Amino acid sequence: MEKHIVPVWFFIGVLLAIYGVLILGSGIYEVFVPLNRKLAMGHLHIGIWWGAGMLLFGLVYVIRFRPNRKNKNM
Amino acid sequence: MMMALACFLQAADARLSLSPVDLIIIILYFVLVLGLGVYLRSFTKTGEEFFMAGREMTAWIAGLSFISANLGSLEMMGYAAATYQYGILVGHAYWIGAIPAILFLGLVMLPFYYICQTHSVPGYLKLRYGEGARSLSAISFAAMTILMSGINMYAMAIIMKVILGWNIHVSIWISSLTVALYVMAGGLRSAIFNEVLQFFLIWIGCLVVPVVGLIETGGWSGMIHRIQANFPGQNFTHMWSTTGAFTNNPMGVHWTGIVFGWGLAISFGYWTTDFLVVQRVMAAKDVRSAKLGTVIGAFFKMMVPLIVILPGLLALAVLPFHLVPESQGAQPNVHTYNEALPLMLARYCGPGLLGLGVTALVAGFMSGMAGNVTAFTTVWTYDIYKPFIRKEAADSHYVSMGRWCSLFGVFVSIGTAYLVMNFSSIIVYAQVIFVFFIVPMFGTVILGMLWKRTTPAAGFWGLLAGILTSLVLWLWVKFDPSALKYVAFSDQAKDMAENLYRAMWSLLSNVFVTVVVSLFTKPKPEHELKGLVYGMTELPSDGNFPIFQRPITWAAAVAVGFVVLNVLFW
């Protein structure tokens, strides 16, 4: 049986989803335990928004390009 | 274990400390890129698979990889630094200095590269002109690639040393050997897959700075207001309106240098003949995908100023101190131009995001280096080793040579990293090298593609004349600075402006010698030019595809965007 290459988009989705969880978690932690260095625009808690966005983006890619799905895109 | 690693990597005088979550992010990245290489090894057995990724990439993969291979840490850090120094003028590298040339590559030149089924750009020169032009271009390309790889490494070492306090040697060796391992394992396919991954990381990691920076300054107009307050009397935010005279802009350049030196000579030389980038789109599954991939690359290239130029401008607006050239940077509490992007990352990014930003810079370094390594490996194996050292061997022998050559190329690159020390900004050094080797290639290739009268002798002598012109002009100014007024038309021209004019002279001499020699020597018979020259090659038509699937449609859209952006930032 011919082996098919898992789409690169799937790997990207996995990494971004994991990064999203880590950055989102860090951002939430910072809300309760402030950093010992001051960030410009720290009140925006950009980590929370960026992490959530990455998690969402990553999950979409993981689902869309999961290996058992018939896919023409590498 | 994580803390032990942090202590091992970080010196006590680090300007920034990475948290455990940052380190996890960086380590996960290394694990994934190595894992991808190992995974793809089982799909990489033949020469075609190792050196050309099986020629089965989709347009999106080819296009993103095409642009990612160009987004080295040199690109990211160097251009942010140059923006701080010269202002938005540097953005010409992304617009007039890239977009016309990339579209020209996709629509005009790429079909010839693709149809003749060569493995490399020097390979095309062999088919068109013979062994002389191929050897000269292959050897100069191999030398340039190794030097560029060394520059990339130097750029990364600065980030790691100055900002993170990392041990230079450890960070260089870990990153370089990771690239060597995944390229050795999976060849071009592995490099391309990783470059697509790196593309996402670079963009997501670097976009934090412009997004938060523009919020801090109150948008574009707020940023300009702050820059004017910080640097009264200097114009950093116009692309064309200050180029009517050499003394009106921080770069000391006239618009003729930008249009003819940058927009024509350097840009067309790099984007249409540098095998590092061309190799990515040559790996596409068909001609239409290759053309479309190039157009996709052009679109994203046009957007790159968001993540490299804008951070440089924001640094001018928000940093509470002024950055200085490298030569003045050896004092405590003094920051140099090259620190512009890392300082901006540090300004806005907390734990997690900082790790992502550092990963983006490391990914930039690795994508650029993998581009250099795979291109060097292919040119060495097919254009130097095969014709000159071992003509007849099994395909598996050349694959094996390619794998070991990847490792060898990385070692030589590490050796060259320390050569990069004598220039005020890294990017200037890159342009010196480009101008020596890449610019004359364009004249030789394009005349060969479009004019069937161009002869094999003209291909060789034209290329040599271009390289020598560039070298001689550079040496002339180096030993007699007053020569600048002849080379660059002004004694006020800065390093970067001098490079633009030297590129123009190099291309002119290349074209002149090629045409003159062609007129006095014997051309190749017409039957040997099939598939290589315009008018002698059957080019596949995209006319049977719907209009929105034709490369020309999207190329036109990118061209319109290019014009609009130039007018907006005039």
Image (cartoon, helix red, strand yellow):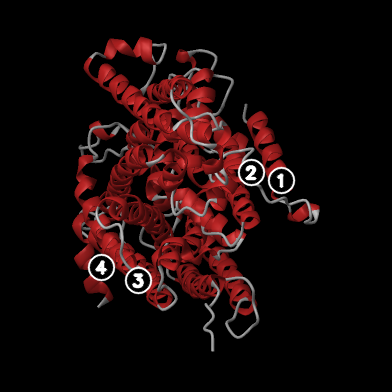
Relative to B181, residue B115 above or below: above
Q: Earlier in the sequence, mark 3 or mark 2?
A: 2
Number of residues whose C-alpha sits closer than 10 Å to that of mark 2, classed few (under 14), some (14–19) or many (20 or more):
some
Q: In which quadrant will I find the N terminus of chain B?
A: bottom left
| Residue at the image position 33 percent from the left and 63 percent from the top | B179
**Front-lying residue, B508 or B92:** B508
| Residue where numbered disc 4 is placed | B6
Q: What is the count of numbered marks?
A: 4
* Residue B111 coordinates in the image, percent (x, y): 60, 48
The amino acid on which the numbered mark 1 sits, given as a three-letter code, is Ile
Callout 2 secondary element: helix
Tell me the tag on residue B185.
3
Dot in front, 1 or 4: 1
The amino acid on which the numbered mark 4 sits, given as a three-letter code, is Ala
The amino acid on which the numbered mark 2 sits, given as a three-letter code, is Leu
The answer for how far apart the CA atoms under marks 4 and 3 are is 29 Å
| Residue where numbered disc 2 is placed | B107
Q: The residue marked by circle 2 belongs to what chain?
A: B
Marks 1/4 same chain: yes
**Front-lying residue, A35 or B305:** B305
Q: Earlier in the sequence, mark 4 or mark 3?
A: 4
